[in-house]
Image: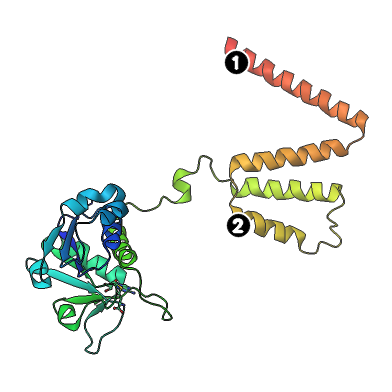
């Protein structure tokens, strides 16, 4: 089970209460619960409640403190999110690396993810209270995300990392597909049938093939067709061939089919009786 009880999100000096509400929502969406607010400009606030929607519980249980030292004092790992590289280089993580560190560290220690002010981010003193900095590789043209969007990106990475550890990854197509894939032999028979039908309708000229059958093969190998789909296509081809026949031949075929069906039914009935 995913447990982020040792991870907290710390917002420093947030000016817009709407952002605090949106952060609470992003956190709850990703399964994080502990929010610490360092000197929020306007909190508690009905605007924050409005933006939090069903994450009001996170706002209600938020811890409000007056310094970042106080907020991260009990944490073994502190990671600060920053849009800009600073003058003194600091160990820098990608969001994925940040998530790996946070997810493994939180088993033993408390972890804080620190986010700065909307207008000026985290100051140097605050950044130096962090063991690592994390930067979301946004476009250089405008790399500063909205505060709640930045929190969402980082929390989503934590969730992905935790899900991967739990082995919860997207199912491969083979795991949920309801039909078996067609075998090589079945597909070969289909190509033969397709070629016959294309010749019969004068679409394909074996004297001048123009790579048609290769292209058809490439199309169907890309799809990896299943048995049911293959049977449908074979049925369509059979109907095309049937409808190309002269009416008297069609009747003969239908009669032959009926005889075949009758014979098959008789075999079935005799087996039932035995
Ligand atoms: N103008 C500020 C950015 C403020 S955005 C600056 O230049 O620093 C508010 C907060 O969101 C930032 O302090 C940071 O914690 C987070 N944030 C925004 N964009 C980010 C990015 N690209 N990478 C990491 N954190 C980011």
**Please, which colouring scheme is shown?**
rainbow
Q: Quadrant of residue 27?
A: bottom left
The answer to whether mark 2 is within 8 Å of ligand 1 is no
Residue bearing the label numbered 1? 271
The answer to whether mark 1 is within 8 Å of ligand 1 is no
The label nearer to you, 1 versus 2, is 2
Q: Residue at x 29, y 64 (%)?
A: 151
Q: Is residue 268 left or right of residue 123?
A: right
Q: Is residue 78 left or right of residue 267?
A: left
Secondary structure beneath disc 2? helix
Q: Where residue 149 sits: x, y (%)?
A: 34, 65
Q: Residue at x 30, y 52 (%)?
A: 50
Q: Residue at x 63, y 17 (%)?
A: 268
Q: Is residue 45 left or right of residue 274?
A: left
Judge whether 243 appears above or below 158 on screen. Answer: above
Residue bearing the label numbered 2? 222
Q: Is residue 62 visible?
A: yes
Quadrant where the image shows the C terminus: top right
The residue lying toward the viewer, choosing from 131 and 18, is 18
Q: Residue at x 26, y 65 (%)?
A: 99
């Amino acid at each position: 089970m995913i447990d982020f009880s040792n991870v907290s999100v710390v917002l420093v000096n947030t000016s817009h209460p709407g952002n605090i509400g949106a952060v609470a929502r992003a956190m709850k969406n990703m399964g994080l619960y502990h929010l610490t607010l360092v000197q929020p400009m306007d909190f508690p606030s009905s605007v924050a409640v409005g933006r939090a929607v069903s994450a009001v519980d996170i706002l209600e249980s938020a811890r409000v403190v007056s310094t970042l030292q106080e907020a991260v004092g009990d944490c073994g790992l502190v990671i600060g999110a920053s849009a800009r590289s600073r003058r003194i280089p600091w160990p820098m993580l990608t969001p994925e690396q940040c998530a790996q560190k946070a997810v493994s560290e939180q088993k033993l220690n408390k972890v804080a993810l620190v986010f700065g002010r909307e207008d000026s981010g985290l100051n140097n003193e605050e950044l130096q209270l962090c063991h690592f900095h994390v930067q979301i590789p946004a476009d250089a043209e405008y790399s500063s995300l909205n505060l709640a969007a930045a929190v969402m990106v980082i929390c989503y990475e934590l969730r992905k990392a935790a899900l991967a550890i739990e082995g919860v990854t997207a199912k491969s197509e083979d795991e949920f597909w309801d039909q078996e894939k067609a075998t090589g032999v079945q597909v070969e028979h289909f190509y033969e049938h397709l070629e016959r039908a294309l010749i019969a309708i004068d679409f394909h000229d074996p004297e001048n093939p123009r790579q048609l059958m290769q292209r058809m093969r490439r199309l169907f190998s890309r799809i990896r067709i299943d048995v049911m789909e293959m049977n449908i296509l074979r049925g369509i081809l059979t109907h095309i061939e049937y409808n190309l026949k002269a009416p008297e031949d069609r009747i003969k075929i239908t009669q032959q089919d009926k005889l075949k069906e009758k014979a098959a039914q008789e075999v079935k009935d005799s087996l039932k009786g035995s």
